[in-house]
Image (cartoon, helix red, strand yellow):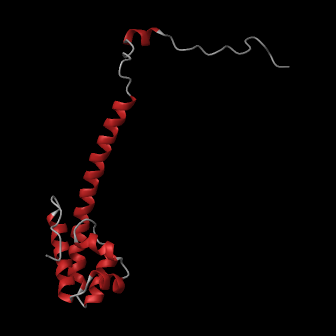
Amino acid sequence: MPRWKDLPDGLDPRVGEFVTRLRRTVDGNGSSLATLADRTGYGRTSWERYLNGRLLAPKGAVIALAEVTGTDPVPLITLWELAERAWSRSELRHDNATEAVRLSRARTVTAPASAPAPAPEAVAADPPPRPRARGRGRTRG
């Protein structure tokens, strides 16, 4: 059975390259996820998500991994920065698409299904309310 799951479909190549480098770093050290969690301060479940491409590892986790494995952190951080930009753009696109769907559904739910829109003439025919006249001709004294 392979140690790692396939990366998610549609994952940005920069994120995929970063995750692959993380995996190689972990494999080169021979650490289990439980050991990695104990030594880095990031949970086992979090490392599973990071190493399977479901969640972008925070920079602190990348630095901790480098320290624990005796790896030069600079190449990992460089790849992380590229992956982080790609991940952020992907999340923004996802958020925008989700918001568009939410708004579309909200419009469908709030729009009355059978009530016709008022005719433009009816709306324009109603004059605006007039302000009340206040005390014309009175003087203070």
Q: Is residue 91 left or right of residue 8?
A: right
Question: Image point 17% across, 87% down: which residue?
Answer: 28
Q: Is residue 102 left or right of residue 8?
A: right
Q: Quadrant of residue 56?
A: bottom left
**Residue 85 at x, y = what percent?**
25, 64
Question: Image point 25% across, 77% down: which residue?
Answer: 77
**Residue 91 at x, y = what percent?**
28, 57
Q: Nearer the viewer, residue 71 or 78?
A: 71
Give the answer, above or below, for where 120 lies relative to 15.
above
Question: Image point 36% across, 35% down: which residue?
Answer: 106
Inspect this view and state whether residue 58 appears: no
Quadrant location of the C terminus? top right
**Residue 51 at x, y = what percent?**
23, 73
Q: Quadrant of residue 36?
A: bottom left
Quadrant location of the N terminus? bottom left
Q: Quadrant of residue 6?
A: bottom left
**Residue 107 at x, y = what percent?**
35, 32
Give the answer, above or below, for where 128 lies relative to 5.
above
